[in-house]
Amino acid sequence: MTACQLAKKSTVNWDVCPAIESAQDAISKSYWTESAKAVVTSARDGKHSKQTAHDNGNAIDLRISNLFPERRLNNRVWYTLVRDFAHTLASALQRLPSAGRFDVVLERDHIHLEHSVGRVPNITGWVPDQFVYCNPAVKAILDPVNPKAAA
Ligand SMILES: [Zn+2]
């Protein structure tokens, strides 16, 4: 019996690898620490344009719009909180006994969670930080270029 199952959007094809299957509880608990519910928006569904870990059931996408709703007015503050949350989630996942590792990618409107077996992701321009990768667009919001710092 799975201790806890994540909520899924009706379009989700939940046909995932055992590591992700058994990570549901940890994902759920991480969300609950922020008083939010974990919702899977995509798993092994066909809407991903190029070959991705989704095709093999090694990745899922998680909703982030329900996190820190009271802070959404300030994009930078909000993404900072969501990035911190991504780190919390990544730490919880690394503590699981599942084989391989989990990479957490903060996209503009979701968290992409990938179980990679021995493979280190090589995403050009993306910034690795302890299993958390930030989409360049998000990174630009988090750390805007400061003209004064360049002087
Ligand atoms: Zn994804």
Image (tube, helix red, strand yellow):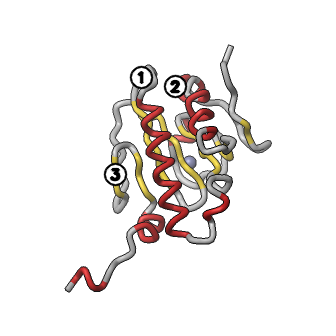
Q: Quadrant of the C terminus?
A: bottom left
* Residue 41 sits above or below residue 141 on the image: above
Badge 2 marks a residue whose secondary structure is helix
From mark 3 to mark 1, how far is it between C-alphas? 21 Å
- Which one is in front, 87 or 110? 87
The residue identified by callout 3 is: 128
Circle 2/circle 1 CB separation < 8 Å: yes
Q: Is residue 52 left or right of residue 25?
A: left
User: Which residue does the image show at 47% across and 60% down from the upper left?
Assistant: 80
**x and y percentages locating residue 70 in the rendered image:** 66, 61
Specify the quadrant of the image occupied by residue 150.
bottom left
**x and y percentages locating residue 4 in the rendered image:** 68, 24
User: Cβ(mark 1) to ligand 1 < 8 Å?
Assistant: no
Amino acid type, residue under disc 1 in the picture: Ala
User: Which residue does the image show at 53% across and 47% down from the upper left?
Assistant: 112
The residue identified by callout 1 is: 99
User: Which residue does the image show at 45% across and 60% down from the upper left?
Assistant: 135
The residue identified by callout 2 is: 19
Q: Quadrant of the N terminus?
A: top right
- Which one is in front, 132 or 72? 72
